[in-house]
Amino acid sequence: MRRLLVINAIIFAVLASAAALAYYGYSYTAEASSRERAIIQDTMRELAEEKIIGIETPILEVDEKLFASIDPDRLPDLAALVHDLQAPVVSVFVLGPDFRVLPSGYVSDPVTRGPAFLAFFESEVVPALELRMLAEGTRAHQHLTLDGSPYLFAYSRRSHNGRAYYVVVEADVVHLVANVFPQFFGVRSPRLYQVVDESGELVFGVPFRERGAAVIELPFAETLSQWRLRVAQRDAGTQAARGRRTVIDIVLIGLALAVITSGLAILLYAVRRERKANALKSDFISNVSHELKTPLSIISMFGEMLAAGRVKTPAQATEYAEVIWRESVRLARLIDNVLDFAKIERGVDIYEFAPGVVGEIVARAVELSTHRLAAAGMTCTVEVDEDLAPARVDNNALTLAVLNLIDNAIKYAADGKRIEVAAHGQGPHIVITVRDFGPGIDPDEHERIFERFYRARAVRLKPIRGSGIGLALVERIAAAHHGGVKVDSVPGQGATFTLWLPAEAARDMTAA
C-alpha cells in the first residue's frame, strides 16, 4: 500500500511538474510574441518616420533655396533662376504687400498654365494661404485640394528695402507621386507602404490584403498635411499562424518529455536554459541599443546645431551635413545587420545574385568605412588583383560582409593602427582577406566567434560594445555564395579573416 502511494505520488508529481512547465512555456511564448509585435511596431514607426523625413527634407531644402534666392528687384530673371536651380516645382509667385502678384513675379511650368492659372491662384489660392498671420522670415505650407486636384504650396514672408513681399512656391505633386514615392516605397521589403488622403482613399501603393495586420499611420507634418503614410508587415497572417503552430508544438513536446522523464530534472534544465537565453537576449538588446544610440546621438547633436544655425561658414554647415550623412549610413548598416540576420534566422530568401566585380565591392566597403577609420586613427591599405575573375554575387550582401570584417578590425584592433584589405584569385576561388594588427584571438575561440551572440573572452573584459551577430552574418553570407570564412590568429600578433567564394560562381546558384 505504501509503495503504491509512493508511485502515485511520483506520477502526480511528474504530471504536476509537466503541467506547470507547459503553462510556463505557453506564458513565456505569449509574452515573447507580444514583445516581438511591439518591436515590429516600433521598427515600422521608426521606418515610417525615416521615410517621411527622407521625402520632406528635399522639398524643404528646395523651398529655402528659392526663398533665399529671389530678389524683388530682379523679377525679370525669375524664370532663369528657377530653371537654374533645377527645382521640382510647378509654379513660383512673388506677391507684394497687397497680396497681388508683382509684375514678372510669376513663373509656371508648364507655361501653358499662363494667365488662367494666375487668375485662379489669386482668386482661390491666396485667400486660403495664411499670409497675414505669417511672421517675417518664417516658412509655412498649405496642402489643398481644389477642383478635385491636389496642390502643395510653401510660402514665406520677406522684406527688401523696408518693404514686405511674399514668395509662394507650388511643389510638383505629380512628380512626388510618380517618381519620388516609387523610389522610397517601391523597393522589395518585408513591409508594405501606402499613402492615403484624409478620407482614406489610396494615393499611392497597393491595398493591404492581410487582415488583422498591425498598421502604423503617420502624417506628413511639414508638407503633404492632408496625406498620411501607412505601413504594415507583409505576410502578417502567415507569421501569426506560424506562431500558433509553434506554441502547440512546444506544449505537446513538453508534455511528452515531462511524462517520460523526471519532471524535476526537466524543470531545472528548462529554467537554466531559459536563464541563459534571457541573458543572451538581454545582452544582445543592450549592446544593439548602445550601438544604435551612438550614431543617433551624433545625428541629433549636429542636426540640432544646424537647425539652431550654430555654424560660422557654409563649409562648416557642409561638414556637419557630411557627418550626419555618414552616421546615417552607419546607422542604416547597423539596422541592416539586425534585420538581415533576423531574415536569415527565419529562413527568408534575401539574396539577389548577379554578375559582379569583387574588387569594386571591396573598394566600396573600404570607402564606406573611411570615417570610422579616421575617427579611430587607423589607416587601411587595399590590394586587389587587376585580373580578378568575375563572380556571381549579391553586391549588397557581400559589401555588408566585408564591412562587418572591417568594422570588427576597427573596433577590436584599434591599437594595431592599421588594417590590410586584399582580394586575390586563388585557383578556382576569389579570396578576400582583412588583416589587423591587434591583440589577436585565442586558438580555442576560432570556431566559436562565428556563433551568433558569442563574443570572445578578451573582448568581454573590455568596455567595447558589440551585437555578437556580425561574424555570424558574415559566415551565413559566405555560405550563401557557396564559399566560407575562417580566421587565422596568434595572440599578440593580430588576426586575418579570410572569406572565399567560387571565381566562377555556380551558374545555377540560388539564394540560400
Image (cartoon, rainbow, N blue to C red):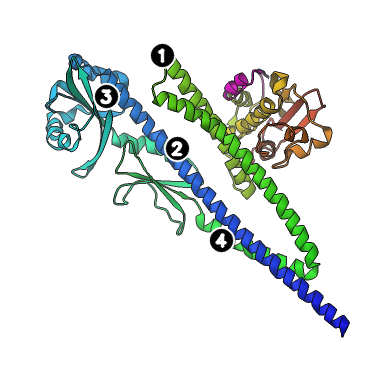
Is residue 87 at least partly visible in the picture?
no
Which residue type does callout 1 highlight?
Answer: Thr
Neighbour tally class for label 2: few under 14, some 14-19, many 20 plus, Cα within 10 Å: few
For label 4, the SS is: helix
Neighbour tally class for label 3: few under 14, some 14-19, many 20 plus, Cα within 10 Å: few
For label 2, the SS is: helix
| Magenta segment boundaries in residue numbering | 367-388
Depth check, mark 4 against mark 1: the one in front is 1
Q: CA distance from mark 4 to mark 1?
A: 57 Å
Marker disc for residue 175: none
In the image, 276 versus 475, the foreground residue is 276
Mark 3 or mark 4, earlier in chain:
3
Q: CA distance from mark 4 to mark 2?
A: 30 Å
Pointer 3 and pointer 4: residues touching (CB < 8 Å)? no
In the rendered image, which residue does mark 3 sit on?
137
Coordinates of residue 483 in the picture (x, y in percent)? 71, 36
Mark 4 or mark 1, earlier in chain:
4
- Extreme-bottom residue of the structure: 1
Q: Is residue 140 left or right of residue 348?
A: left
Mark 4 or mark 2, earlier in chain:
2
Figure check: 188 above or below 69:
below
Q: In which image quadrant can residue 104 be found?
A: top left
